[in-house]
Image: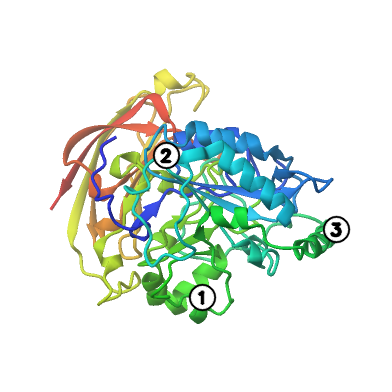
Amino acid sequence: MQVRDDMGLPLSHYFIYTGHNSYLTGNQLSSGCSEVPIAKALLDGVRVIELDLWPNAAKDDVEVLHGRTWTSPVELGRCLDAIKEHAFVSSPYPVILTLEDHLTPHLQAKVAKMIKETFGDTLHLSESETMTEFPSPEDLKGKIIVSTKPPKEYLQTKSNKEESQNGDTEEDSVWGEEIPDNKALMDVGREVSDQDTKRYVKEEEDMEKLAQVGVNMEYKRLIAISLTRRKHDMDEDLKVDPNKVSRMSLGETAYEKATTTHGAKIIKFTQKNLLRIFPRTTRITSSNYNPLMGWRYGAQMVAANMQGHGRKLWLTQGMFRANGGCGYVKKPNFLMNCDKMFDPRSNLPVKTMLKVTVYMGDGWRLDFHKTHFDKFSPPDFYARVGIAGVVADTRMEETKVIMDNWIPTWDHEFVFPLAIPELALLRVEVHESDNHQKDDFGGQTCFPVWELRTGIRSVRLCGRDGELMRSVKLLMRFEFT
């Protein structure tokens, strides 16, 4: 691991590799819950793990599951053990544990005991209830940090996840739709029936009555990063308190609306405070949204469904290949400039030109069966290369199709003018052209432009899940002018 960024700045100065519903093994509606995806996420460098805590049927124990769905639960202890075992294998920098808490004070006390016993000295406890500035990743090395709402706010409002939001279409191919800059998509389904919803609301009403018994102080002391209760007035929500830092959570739709009316305020808020953006609950297939929508405005915790493989997750994986893959990437200086607020929608001048040449590719004949792409002939490969970044920089181009060849030679040069290379990701995909069906997936990768090394490089491609393929690689050249 080669960490290049200054890690001594407050947490608010970094993009943080953030997971969503970290315990799910598949879709958001009916898949199983397990500690296995938590362990994998941590090994992949994820630094923010989310657990949804619910009472069991007898109301005497805690389960981790996606509430108001048919997901099967997993024991909280197994999740905590997985975090303890894998938290610092891939990165020494802090792991933030965000809790979506639906518990009574009695169960909160049980959770507090479990967390303290499991994590021991690795648990970071704040010295006071309020901080004027977050500590740095360097200060918090080897620490686990709990972030949730203070218990006194238990069930005063519905969870952010339950806010009414527009839905999304399902992914339309094995690798997902092409990434839009920012568009509203139509809803395709509901998570649960009206009868199920009424049952859950009744259970929550019963729990709210129990919650009036009192606040569990041991649980409250665990919370090192407090989640601010939203006022649902964006002007109020984005006010910066000079005496206190906190974390706010916004759903994807609410956030996208806010960027059109409060873009500068979001940037100012995130210069000091943490902002977490989470996917719509109606993304039942665990698909994701364009994370650059969050990063352009300084949102540190752009949450991704790590089991939702597709183009949007590839961007997240590409971003956090930066800074040695440690899970923390320092935000560009212009997002921290208090004198002149950055506007990612403005007409920005070109800073540099990136030339990318794709010479040839090889390795498919070793990693795929000879009839995987075409039954009676060698495959017909083409490459797609582009930039994901601010609106002015975003584009995607492709080479010609090389027919009937396991080792295609394209010799194609792409030129990308870049206004904000500090937020640009280079996207590379290879597909096999098929006139009669959807084109077959042949590999992909994504890199932070600011970390590209100039010259001729051998570039290994990844599968849909972001894991490196054994043999598939491209010969490419990168040049800045």
In x, y percent, where is residue 267? Answer: 37, 70
In x, y percent, where is residue 166? Answer: 63, 66
Q: Disc 2 or 1, which lies upstream in sequence?
A: 2
User: What numbered label is drawn on residue 50?
Assistant: none
Position of residue 402 in the picture relative to residue 207 (left or right): left
Q: Amino acid at mark 3?
A: Arg
Q: Quadrant of residue 406?
A: top left
Which residue carries the number 3 mark?
199
Which residue carries the number 2 mark?
45
Which residue carries the number 1 mark?
237
Q: Amino acid at mark 1?
A: Asp
Secondary-structure class at tag 2: loop
Secondary-structure class at tag 3: helix
Could you tell me if the residues under marks 3 and 2 are in contact, i.e. CB atoms within 8 Å?
A: no
Position of residue 390 in the picture relative to residue 155 (left or right): left
Check disc 3: other Cα within 10 Å, few if <14, some if 14-19, many if 20+. few
Q: Amino acid at mark 2?
A: Gly
